[in-house]
């Protein structure tokens, strides 16, 4: 079960902002599983976190903070061209 959570977080971070369809789908699947509030069986995100005694909200908040920092960092590193006059 721990491997499921680790793999989902890894996929969320490595496939974030990917362009190819396969990478986008993997990211969408990981995001949907992590941020789903549904209790659909023993392998839903909340049930897996409960079994591991991990707070799912901490993981979610951490990923959202990571995403904000990543987007902010990319904006800082963008090359800006002077506007033509």
Image (spheres, helix red, strand yellow):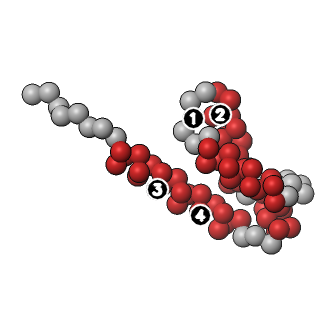
Disc 1 to disc 3, how far (Cα)?
Answer: 17 Å
Q: Are marks 4 and 1 in contact (CB under 8 Å)?
A: no
Which residue is at a point 71% across and 42% down the rendered structure image?
29
Q: Earlier in the sequence, mark 4 or mark 2?
A: 2
**Helix, strand or loop at mark 2:** helix
Residue found farthest to the bottom:
53
- Tell me if 16 is positioned left or right of 26 in this view: left
Q: Would residue 31 be seen by someone viewing this image from the given angle?
A: no
Disc 4 to disc 1, how far (Cα)?
Answer: 21 Å
> Mark 3 Cα within 10 Å, few/some/many (few <14, many 20+)?
few
User: Disc 3 vs disc 4: which is toward the camera?
Assistant: 3
Q: Position of residue 33 (x, y in %)?
A: 74, 50
User: Disc 4 vs disc 2: which is toward the camera?
Assistant: 2
Which residue is at a point 68% across and 53% down the rendered structure image?
9
Give the residue number, with chain letter if any, for mark 3: 69
Give the residue number, with chain letter if any, for mark 2: 23
- Residue 61: mark in rendering: 4
**Helix, strand or loop at mark 1:** loop
Which residue is at a point 35% across and 45% down the rendered structure image?
77
Give the residue number, with chain letter if any, for mark 1: 18
**Helix, strand or loop at mark 4:** helix
Q: Are marks 3 and 4 in contact (CB under 8 Å)?
A: no
> Mark 2 Cα within 10 Å, few/some/many (few <14, many 20+)?
some
- Tell me if 36 is positioned left or right of 69 in this view: right
Q: Position of residue 31 (x, y in %)?
A: 67, 47
Q: Earlier in the sequence, mark 1 or mark 3?
A: 1
Disc 4 to disc 2, how far (Cα)?
Answer: 23 Å
> In this picture, is 31 found above or below 56?
above
């Amino acid at each position: 079960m721990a491997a499921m959570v680790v793999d989902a977080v890894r996929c969320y971070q490595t496939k974030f902002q990917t362009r190819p369809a396969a990478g986008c789908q993997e990211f969408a699947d990981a995001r949907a599983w992590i941020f789903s509030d549904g209790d659909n069986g023993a392998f839903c995100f909340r049930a897996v976190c409960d079994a591991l005694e991990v707070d799912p909200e901490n993981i979610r908040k951490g990923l959202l903070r990571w995403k904000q920092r990543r987007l902010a960092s990319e904006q800082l590193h963008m090359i800006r061209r002077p506007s033509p006059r």
